[in-house]
Structures are given as C-alpha cells and as structure tokens.
Image: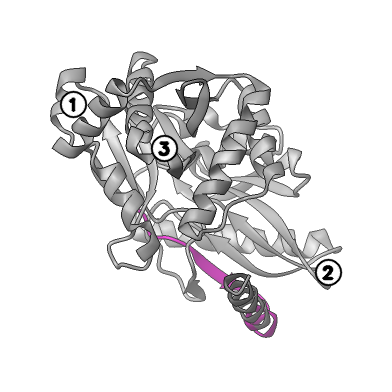
Amino acid sequence: MKIVIEKDKNYDHLLSQKFISGNFLQSSIWIEFLKRQKKNFWPIAVESENKILALCLFYETSLPMGLSYLTSPKGPIFLTETSEEDKKEISKLLLSKARDICISTKKKDEIFCRLEPSAEIKIPGLKKSKDIHPRDTWILNLDKEEKDLLAGMHPKTRYNIAVAKKNGVQIKFSQEKEDIKHFLNLIKLTAARNQISVHSDNYYTLLWETLLSNRAGSLALAEYKGEVVAANLLLNFGQSCVYLHGGSNYKYRNLMAPSLLQWESIKQAKAAGFLVYDFWGIAPQDNSQARWEGITRFKKGFGGERLVSPGAYDYIYHPTWYQIYHLGRKTISKLRKFR
C-alpha cells in the first residue's frame, strides 16, 4: 500500500459510484468550499497495485496560540470490501501521513487528528470523540412509484402534506444567489426556537456559492401569500440528493409547510434521477442527542431506513493541549447557555 497526495486530482467518480451518506464531504465540491473558507487541506488516496482502496480528505482548523487540529469529514471512506487487517493498515498509513502533514505545516502545532470513518476501525490510540457530523442518518430509496412512496409514509405525514396544499402553500426551487437571504433568516429563527447552534451567515453563503458554481444544489422554498415560511438547502452528489440544512417560521406552523417542502423535494430528486433522498442527521440510538427527537420523528415520518456510521474518533498528538482544548469547549458551551 502507498499514500498519494495530489491536490488537483478529482476522485468524484469513485465517491459517487457507491452510496455512502456524507461522501460529498470528501468530494471536489467540499474542496472548493474549503478553499472559499481559506482553509488548508490535503486530499489523500491509499493505493495498492494501482487500485484506490480508500480516500481521506483532511483540512486544518486553527485554534488560539498557534495551535490547530486536523479533521477528515466522514473519512476515511473505504471504497472496496476490505478486511479488518487492511482497514487497520490503511488507517495507520493515513494517521502517519497526517502526522507528516502536521510537521510540514510548521506555522501551526496540531494537537489531534479527527476521523469520521465510513466503517469501524480498531487501532490503538483512537479515542471516541463528540460527533461533528451526524453519526446516524435517515435515507429514502427513490426506486419506487410516487404512490408507493406516499404509502410508505406515516399517516400523519401524509395528512400534513394535504393540509399544506389545502392552505395554499406553494413550493419553488431556486438557484438564485440572493435567495440565500430567506434561508439565513429562517435558520436563525429555528436555532433560537430549538436552542441549537448553527453556522455563521458567511459559512452558509460560501456553501451556497460553492453549490451554485458546481450546479450541485438548490434552495427549496415554501411560500405563503408571498412570504417564504420554510427553506431547505439541498445538495446533490452522486446517487443522492441531501437535505443538508433547513429552517422554518414557527408563526406559520399550522400551515404544515415543511412537510410539503420535503415531499416536493423528494419528488424533484426522483424526477432528476437520484436513487436516494438523504435526510441527513437523526438522533443516534444511544439517546445522546435528545434535542434531535422532534426532527428525527419528522424525518422518519416520510418512510425510509436508518444508516449507522461509527462516528468521530480523535488521534491525540499532545495530551495536555487536548485536555485544555476540551475544557475550553465546555466553558464556551456553558457561557452560551447563560446568554
């Protein structure tokens, strides 16, 4: 086995051949998004006999005092049926290369490396960490007739879709740059209502610009009497359409606009030839995300199945700084609760 790093190499054709929820986070789309955020990144491939076994995109997040850490979002992704021993060897190679990356950056002192592997790996030194991207996701197979998709829904979901139609909610799909303003407004309302953290306006704006430049997504907007009352950010990659982020105005909750918005998004994804509608994150089965119960129930109402991944693991280079980092994160989290 050997490691290959080519920053200009595009592996999208490999990533898109097999559906793995989150594989877009290792794609050229995400690399462009990292560039727009001015982040350092390293796309790594593990090869054997001219065959690529795994892909692992790393990027660097800066911390105070000249520190940083590396993250591989939903990576490494194992592209072939691989034995446990081979997974260990691949992972060790990747972590070794990550350490080389740390040394070569010089300007920053990386204190740990975070992996979110597509399959369980068991090697010494990996410590279970708090999940960054969803560990469990909810996916819907689109290889069915529309009537069968409707039949697979919870009766309450079908009822809510009918209510939204009866109330005159209209759905449109936009690729207009300025329409991000509707999404930004609604996701802030949703975050405040549910007491959850969301990304900055700049993050979502850069993401939207990245999707537009790659023709890889759309904004699904629900309108009522000329006002946008719900908005979803959809990302298209490989075989799947991903419901990545969404927000709604609670004042119009009786309209049931989010239900119709999802159904029309599912229909559009099916018509476009996607095989999977990926609802993205749901609450893990260990009840570690109690705040996600409502959104989990909402997503599961459309039918589908749970897709489980191992979650996040950290490989620690500097134990003392690692402890200080987590203490700082806990302190910031507590201060936010008192705002």
Horizontal relation, residue 276 to residue 74: left or right: left
Q: Nearer the viewer, mark 3 or mark 1?
A: 3
Q: Nearer the viewer, mark 1 or mark 2?
A: 1
Disc 1 residue type?
Leu
Instruction: Judge whether 196 appears above or below 29 on screen.
Output: below
- Is 312 part of what is drawn in magenta? yes
Task: Estimate the x, y position of residue 33 in percent, counting from the top left.
Answer: 67, 38
Sooner in the amino-acid sequence: mark 1 or mark 2: 2
Q: How many other residues sit within 10 Å of disc 2, few (<14), some (14-19) or many (≥20)? A: few
Q: Nearer the viewer, mark 3 or mark 2?
A: 3
Task: Estimate the x, y position of residue 136 in percent, counting from the top left.
Answer: 35, 53
Name the residue: 31% across, 50% down: 296
Instruction: Judge whether 101 appears above or below 252 on screen.
Output: below
Sooner in the amino-acid sequence: mark 3 or mark 1: 1
Task: Estimate the x, y position of residue 302 in percent, counting from the top left.
Answer: 24, 36
Local SS, label 3: helix
Query: Spatial distance from mark 3 to mark 2, Cα to Cα?
Result: 47 Å
- Is 62 part of what is drawn in magenta? no
Which residue matches tag 2?
A: 66
Residues shaded magenta: 309-323
Sooner in the amino-acid sequence: mark 3 or mark 2: 2
Does residue 164 show up? yes
Query: Spatial distance from mark 3 to mark 1, Cα to Cα?
Result: 24 Å
Name the residue: 42% across, 57% down: 87
Local SS, label 2: loop
User: Residue 255: which quarter of the image?
Assistant: top left
